[in-house]
Amino acid sequence: MDGAVDRLRQHAKASATRDLLPELLPSESLARLELWLSGSITEDHGDLLAELVLFTNPALWPDAQLGSVLCRSLGCPVGFAAWVIGQNRFRLERLMVRTDRRIRAVRLAKSIGTGSQWPEQLGRIRRLVWRMMARAVSGDPVTRAASLQLGRVARALARFLVNHPICGTPEAHALQTQADLTLQCLQAESPRPDSASSARATRSFARETPPLDLRLRA
């Protein structure tokens, strides 16, 4: 009986994950996101760092930190961020609302600080990227596509830290190396889709999915 219940739960989880897969980042948007975060596109470059500092503030809940970075700073779909956190998308939406209220209540600032503040702030951002990589490698075969997308986002953020004028520390370079290796492992484990069916799916997805606004929200 217990085994049957476990199988039903696994089936329900797999079905829910398949429903989220259409909300993954389109390949064109992800390519632009990687260029933008790596410094090749410099719009709002400084503002992104300020957003990362704001949303990794220890006054916010861990899930709120990760959800805010993915949805608010990087423009990821809510369904994708909910899968990363391991929560229902509606619970994540409520959490985002509570996060906005908390930011206003405690008057958190976007300032990146100077001197002794900066190493601590950078450490929080690096831990967030580590959490993304850990979630990416923990996915099951059903969530392979989502894991691969998350691995790419983590690598893009690591590259952003390396290429930023005040973030290119040895720790940031080590993080980028680990992010590159993590993504290579994920790509090696991902089955190669049939080229024709993959092209059809990409064209269909591009028609149904509006382009993401990758600029930071005020």
Image (spheres, grey):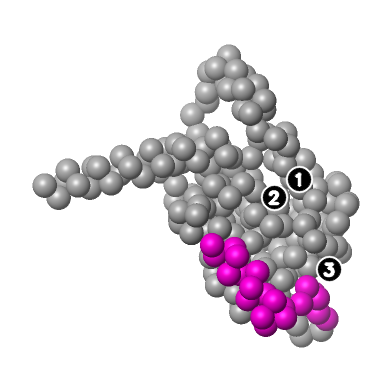
- Above or below, 3 relative to 126: above
Q: Which residue is mark 3?
A: 166
Contact, CB < 8 Å: mark 3 with mark 2?
A: no
Q: Residues within 10 Å of mark 3 (few under 14, many from 20)?
A: few
Q: For marks 3 and 1, give the CA distance.
A: 26 Å
Outermost residue on the bottom side: it is 116
**Is residue 99 highlighted in magenta?**
yes
Could you tell me residue 29's position as x and y percent?
A: 72, 38
Which circle marks residue 46 in the picture? Answer: none
Q: Amino acid at mark 1?
A: Asp
Q: Nearer the viewer, residue 167 or 124?
A: 124
Could you tell me residue 85's position as x and y percent?
A: 50, 57
Element type where label 3 sits in the image: loop
Q: Residue at 77% x, 40% y: name it.
A: 32
Could you tell me residue 70's position as x and y percent?
A: 64, 55
Q: Which residue is mark 1?
A: 213
Q: Amino acid at mark 3?
A: Ile
Q: For marks 3 and 2, give the CA distance.
A: 24 Å
- Above or below, 47 relative to 191: below
Q: Residue at 25% x, 42% y: name it.
A: 8
Q: Is residue 102 left or right of residue 18?
A: right
Contact, CB < 8 Å: mark 2 with mark 1?
A: yes
Q: Which residue is mark 2?
A: 75
Q: Quadrant of the C terminus?
A: bottom right
